[in-house]
Image: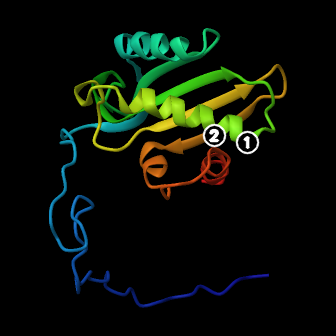
Amino acid sequence: MVLPVLTREALPLPKLIATASTPHIAQGPDGANTAVPSYPEGCGYQWAYQDMPELSADFLQALQALQPEAQGNAFAFGENCLNGDGSIKRFIPMETDFNITLQVNDVTDESELGEWIVKVMMVIDAIPPDQIIGPRPGRVSLGFQPSEPQTFVSFYIDQYHGLSPGLSTAEIYAALKTQ
């Protein structure tokens, strides 16, 4: 079978026409600029974490004052600015995050879990602002364990602060668990 040769007239490349401009991501809906980290040119970006040993040590000490078995650390989450060869030019922090593991009597007791959330947030809120890096509110990841299985809840700090006043500790846990 012989297929016929199809001929088509070559069409010119379409021209892009800008009809409306999209504001830069750093601009709010009203066009106002918000504070964002400056991104150096010539970078490839990769999600990254950076240890914060001094803050982690202080944070762990404060947690263990509440519960000697507690474990926790703080770290910066952001992006590595990579050179063309893959080496890191610099780290650009976006937020300070916290990981915590606590021993509880009953992982189904939402009131007890909510009480621990409140206590941990009091510790985090007491950290001096100059020790928190990045323009965004950080994330708190809590693991509760009597042994196995472990129960987790993870939320952003501003989600906790945005909860309605007057919630019971069980309601705090339930609200953040579903975030």
Q: Quadrant of the N terminus?
A: bottom right
Rendered residue at 36%/25% (across/down): 86
Rendered residue at 51%/29% (across/down): 120
- Asked if labels 1 and 2 touch by Cβ distance under 8 angstroms, the answer is yes
Q: Position of residue 135 (x, y in %)?
A: 28, 42
Which quadrant holds residue 102? top right
Q: Position of residue 123 (x, y in %)?
A: 44, 26
Give the SS element for disc 1.
helix
* Residue denoted by label 1: 110
Q: Which amino acid does the dot numbered 2 rest on?
A: Gly
Give the SS element for disc 2.
helix
Rendered residue at 18%/50% (across/down): 35
Rendered residue at 73%/42% (across/down): 110
**Observer able to see residue 48:** no
**Observer able to see residue 22:** yes
* Residue denoted by label 2: 114
Q: Is residue 132 above or below residue 26?
A: above
Q: Is residue 84 above or below residue 94?
A: above
Q: Residues within 10 Å of mark 2 (few under 14, many from 20)?
A: many
Q: Position of residue 134 (x, y in %)?
A: 29, 36
Q: Which amino acid does the dot numbered 1 rest on?
A: Glu
Say which of 13 and 64 sits in front: 64
Say which of 82 and 164 sits in front: 164
Say which of 152 and 7 sits in front: 152
Q: CA distance from mark 2 to mark 1?
A: 6 Å
Q: Position of residue 161 (x, y in %)?
A: 43, 49
